[in-house]
Image (cartoon, grey):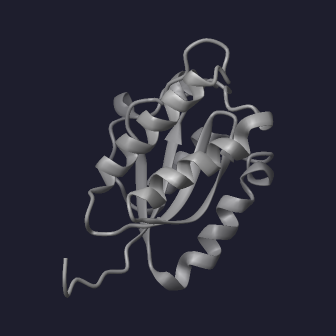
Amino acid sequence: MANTYTQIHIHAICAVQNRQSLIHRSWEEELYRYITGIVQNDGHKMLQINGMPNHFHMLLGLRPTQALSDVMKRVKGESSKWINRNKLAAGRFSWQEGFSGFSYSKSQLPQVIKYIQNQKLHHEKKSFKQEYLELLKKWEVDYDERYLFNFID
């Protein structure tokens, strides 16, 4: 797309099906590298990725050549296949339906990167459900509780 100039930064969140803690520390970094490869192969830029055993956060520079929903469908589909093909999780692994995406300006990126880098420390004090609901409220996202991630308390 000649003469197209954008700066689109998206913080996306995905949860493991039924919020099970299936992402094991022994292969977590390899998973994040694999997801980074998917994002970069589609022409986007991975700025940060990290998470917990039951969900992950990523911050990406999104190119206007692909819709966010298509990026997330590809990330979730390809990474699930990779996890299952390599038999990394007990049983069949899948991501929960849906995702969240929040946009940020360039000046906010250092703060978001730090937030994503510190997920493990962050979740010592706050559950994923608390974190998620706070993000929805902060961004004034209308939601129907019936369609939120399936939270296991």
Q: Can residue 131 be seen in this view?
A: no
Task: Give the quarter of the image for residue 147.
Answer: top left
Please count the marks in the image: 0
Which residue lies at the image location 53% right of the left edge and 85% below the top edge?
107
Residue shown at 30% from the left, 48% from the top: 70
Q: Report x, y in % for residue 94.
A: 50, 25
Dividing the picture into quarters, in which one does residue 64 lie?
bottom left
Residue 63 percent across, percent down from the top left: 34, 69
Q: Where is residue 135 in the image (x, y as percent from the top left)?
A: 51, 55
Instruction: Return the residue found at the far left.
Output: 2
- Asked if residue 61 is positioned above or below residue 122 in the image, the reply reads below
Can residue 43 be spotted in the picture?
yes
Indicate the quadrant containing the N terminus: top left, top right, bottom left or bottom right: bottom left
- Where, quadrant-wise, is the C terminus in this rendering? top right
In percent of the image, x 49 and y 82: which residue is there? Answer: 106
Above or below — where is 78 with respect to 41?
above
Q: Where is residue 91 in the image (x, y as percent from the top left)?
A: 61, 11
Height in image: 22 above or below 53?
above
User: In this picture, is 90 found above or below 101?
Assistant: above
Q: Residue at x 56, y 23 (%)?
A: 85
86 or 136: nearer the eye? Answer: 86
